Image (spheres, grey):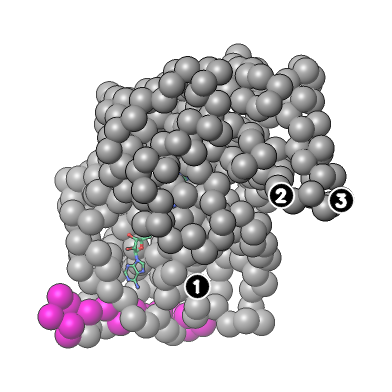
Amino acid sequence: MGGATVLIVGAGPAGLVLGNLLLAAGVDCLIVERSSRTHVERRARAGFLAEATVRVLVDNGLGTGLLARGTRHDTCVFRSEQGEFALRYGALGREEAHTVYPQQHLVADLVAEFLRRGGDLRFGTPVSEVGGLDGERPWLLAHREDGTPYRLTGRYVAGCDGRHGVCRRRVPADAARPHRRRHGVSWLALLVGTPPALPAVTYAVHDRGFAGHMARTPSVTRYYLQCEPGTDPASWSEAALWEELDLRMRAERFGPLRRGPVLERAVVDLESDVLDPMQYGRLFLAGDAAGLISPSAAKGANLAVMAAETLARGFTAAVHEGDEEPLARYSATCLPRIWRAQEFSHWMIGLLHAPAGDDEESRFLRALRDSRLENLRTSRAHQHAFADNYVGV
Ligand code: RFL
């Protein structure tokens, strides 16, 4: 038994930002997390934080680590058969840059701060059931490490439990509509224990498939290599991975990559998904639990932080002022921002990929991809719009 005013499921960026903001506002909450603290603090995923995200974190006392150890990135480079060009997006559009700070470091900072603020964060505590959502006292069924179940009750539940969580599954099919697209494109996501080989994010468009290079820390680099959907990540030898990266990044023409040990590899299927509305009764979904965005434009963690901030304001108004209006508008506030990010991510997929076949549709899509890239290279208006969307959330 037990509980809190706001029961938060999941200690990823969404749940932890929400929890920290609620504690700062004096709203009683607790976070239950299925995994161990070590696991969540080591889970490498995102790295590129937009300025709006950084502002939310810094303004709420959550930015010490990222300000001290994050690095500023304001340029991206595109390589193709036609050559290479750089876009200094930090000097275009709203003139905003990214802060590169690995997600696992951000999560570790947010955990430390939540505990420092006296928060109740229960690791190793999976939630198996969520109920009472259309009544006044919603509840969770959580499990202790020995498996013993216990019930937590609250006034609201925040489903921040990611793409495979239980919360979203409790939204009745007739209460919210999913909008989904599977892009038929997969990436082999690699973390390599070597300093970035290139000074900027580099996207390589190649008829053998997309390849990408992104800084993470001074000693770790992320590489992406488009692969066949369903590929077993272990099926690539390290030698084959480097050979393919060299080929698609055109190392012979633009300079060698810095080889190093592959620390982690996973296949990511590019998928987009938006649930509308992101709420049902007393349940509010945030981050990947509410929807997925393909990693083509690096927006998932940013959207998670922004949704958490909106939700924190909603809970605070409801609890302290009895004003439920901001909570009622939660989905309507978040969805336009989410759709704008989805539209841009989808456009990026078309910029970076096209089918390899020699049939007429594949040829058409490749020519379209090349034209999109050429537009971006030559049109100043296009570059400004790109910059607005690339760093915007
Ligand atoms: P998370 O981070 O998945 O956290 C959800 C948490 O909920 C817990 N959980 C449960 N706890 C209790 N009971 C249950 N039944 C539970 N079920 C789940 C989980 O253990 C977990 O701790 O979701 P959140 O907070 O919504 O955050 C979303 C982001 O993690 C995600 O969108 C990004 O990582 C996406 N993403 C990127 N986003 C960016 O903004 N920039 C990037 O550069 C970027 N790169 C990436 C990415 C995602 C990637 N993968 C692995 C899909 C690169 C990759 C490779």
**Label 1 crowd (10 A; few <14 / some 14-19 / many >=20):** many
Q: Residue furthest top?
A: 91
365 to the left or right of 85: right
Q: Secondary structure at mark 3?
A: helix
Q: Is mark 1 within 8 Å of ligand 1?
A: no
82 to the left or right of 330: right
Residue 227, horizontal then vertical, whole percent: 54, 51
Q: Residue at x 26, y 54 (%)?
A: 40
Quote the CA–CA distance across marks 3 and 1. 41 Å
Q: Amino acid at mark 3?
A: Glu
Q: Residue at x 57, y 65 (%)?
A: 278
Find residue 360 and name its label: 3
Please state which of residues 121 and 220 is positioned toward the viewer in this rendering: 220
N-term-proximal mark, 1 vs 2:
1
Q: Secondary structure at mark 1?
A: helix
Residue bounds of the magenta highlight: 133-148
Magenta span includes 28:
no
Q: Residue at x 31, y 42 (%)?
A: 262
Please state which of residues 149 and 241 is positioned toward the viewer in this rendering: 241
Q: Amino acid at mark 1?
A: Arg
Residue 152, horizontal then vertical, whole percent: 28, 78
Where is mark 2, residue-wise?
A: 355
Q: Nearer the viewer, mark 3 or mark 1?
A: 3
**Label 3 crowd (10 A; few <14 / some 14-19 / many >=20):** few
Quarter of the image with the C terminus in it: top right
Q: Nearer the viewer, mark 1 or mark 2?
A: 2
From where the camera sits, is residue 52 visible?
A: no
Where is mark 1, residue-wise?
A: 168
- In the depicted structure, whether residue 241 falls above or below residue 144: above
**Label 2 crowd (10 A; few <14 / some 14-19 / many >=20):** some
Quote the CA–CA distance across marks 1 and 2. 33 Å
N-term-proximal mark, 3 vs 1:
1
